[in-house]
Amino acid sequence: MKVKKMNRLFIEAMRYSIRLTKNIAPYLVWFDGIKNIWYAVMPLINNGVLPSLGIIMITKLNNQEDMGLWMTLFIGATAIFLMTTSVLTEFENYFDIQRSEKSFQESKMFIAKKIDQLDPARLFTGDFSEVKANFESKGWKSMEFLYQKNFSILQALIALTFSIGIAIWLSPWVILLALIPGIYSGVSIVITNKKGLKIWDKGLHNRMLHSEYDGLVSNNRSVLQTIFHGSRSYFKNRFIQTRELMNENLLQRQKLQIKRRSVFIVINLICTIGAIIVICIPAIHGEMTVAKWPIAYAAYIGIRNGITQLAFHLAGVISSMQEYQRYFVPFANLQPLYPEGNQNVSTLLPIKLDDVVFTYPNEKKSTLKGLSLTIEKGETVGLVGQNGGGKTTLINMLAGVYFPDSGRFSLGGIQIQNIKRSSLYEFLLVESTNNGLPKTTVREIVSASLDPKNDQLIWESLEMVGIKGFVEKLPKQLDTEIGERWKKSKLLSSGQMKRLSLASLHFKSRNPRIELVILDEPMNSIDPETKKLFYNAIARKELFPGKTVIVCLHDEQFEYLFPRLIRIKDGVSLKEKVFIPNISTIAEYQA
């Protein structure tokens, strides 16, 4: 990593982390600074100054000289030390709870804001899921760790400065003896961490496999699947094998740490004995008093630990910076694949595609190849064709997910590339095969609201999709919680969830601004007889009256229900069928 780039990323990361800290509590940054300064001098006071004052007090008491003064001084210093430490500790515990909870909330808000800046096409890409997962697991933490490590470095530098100053005053030679174990410890930590990281990376594949096998052997749905497929024994064995490989990887890293610590223990023991001797020699000549000795020894410990901590936290900063660059920056810098325009629309109709060509990112073969069609206001259109023919791509393009590579595609006379997506979604509803509905209450699922004033309309929507009777029998009716996560909740079949999804769409379609309703395989998981009823209700404008409706369907037996049918094959509108009610013949023409 180049120095300039490192500096830029460092400043950027610190800005993020300081902004986050201020959001948690306005004065938390100042508290962190004061806390680390106190923690830097605390060992010197606790291990050096207070014992020295205690020795002087005992000596004065033995000699009955200034007893009240030295007792007051020692008790006062001890009380101030304990009170300061206790107050800072309590505040630290309070802020740690705030930091933990609010940091999690802030990370979710950061993700939500970033997603709002992106386009749907970017969200559909496989790399987005990976980048987002890395950001959540490591990227956000790296930014937090960087903030903490910088304050830890400040603490180590202050402790080191005070300790060296005292050592120069009392016993300069202890500086050299403290440097040896301190430097070894610091350098060995950096080297060990680097080697440990390589071992960790080598075990990444096994950890990912173990996580996957863990889900297969413990998740209730996956367990059933492996039992039904006759593969549970195999996956249980693979789970055990990968766990053993993970343990082996862990042991390799532990051996590195044990080796480093063993050498440090020997070096530290030799240097500590040397430091004690060096401090004691001046006492022979009366230059080192009983009161000064604890302070000199505390200075030795402070220098040794200060160097160790400095190296450790510097290594932590470097590691955090690498993780920040690898996991935080890629997510923060994500850009839309198809940037939106700046025009608001007053209508989406008519829809016109003229010789539209579209190729998915990183694909060579075009999905849409010169597609041309027009859909007028109020039409109900069925899209049919084989899988991979371009139906879902067309629907996603109509929903503003993708823009054409070439050709003209306009909504209400405005090119799709020039329309603001927020304006587009004011007039549009889309029912996807993966609807992503929340698993909360029936009321929220249908209306996206807790307001009971909508209840009458909710019941009407439920009745329209044939699930009103079922919901009326639920323990809390509209307030019944759906899904396995709630106590006393109701588990719904996939067909029932599909009906709730359609009820939600019907409820929202009552908004007079909605002009266009797009349904991508809306009858998935619904029995044939009910499918016919639904498709019939859609075609006859009973389900979405006054709306332009486009339905993507794979059920050939229900094609005749739609007044207009567009067949798409290999990205081209192959032919259309116009079904005229009450007439047995079908007028068919080439598109």
Image (tube, rainbow, N blue to C red):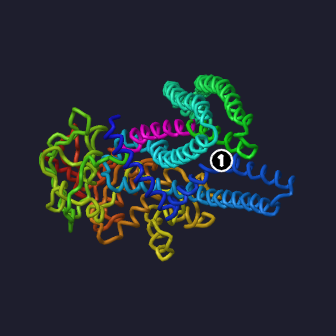
Question: Which of 389/171 is in front?
Answer: 171
**Near-viewer residue (327 or 282):** 282
Q: Which amino acid does label 1 sit on?
A: Leu
What residue occupies the far front of the structure in this picture? 285
Q: Is mark 1 on a helix, strand or loop?
A: helix
Which quadrant of the rendered structure holds the N terminus?
Answer: top left
Asked whether 310 falls inside the magenta stretch, the response is yes
216, 42: nearer the viewer: 42
**Dominant secondary structure of the residues highlighted in magenta in the image:** helix
Percent position of residue 358, x then y: 20, 42
Image: 581 above or below 291: below
Magenta range is: 308-330
Q: Say whether residue 242 is visible.
A: no
Considering only vertical position in the picture, is 12 above or below 282?
Answer: below
Q: In this view, does 506 lie to the left or right of 37?
A: left
Residue at 57% x, 36% y: name it: 308
For the question of whether residue 88 can be seen, the reply is yes
Q: What residue appears at the point 25 percent right and 55 percent down from the top-left corner?
A: 381
Q: Which residue, given by chain and number where applicable, does mark 1 sit on?
A: 44
Query: What percent of the width, then of the height, locates residue 140?
Result: 46, 47
Residue furthest bottom in the image: 453
Drawn side of residue 556 relative to residue 445, left or right: left
Residue 524 position, x and y percent, is: 42, 48
Residue 572: x and y in percent read: 18, 41
Q: Quadrant of residue 125?
A: top left
Mark 1 closeness class: few <14, some 14–19, many ≥20 residues within 10 Å = many
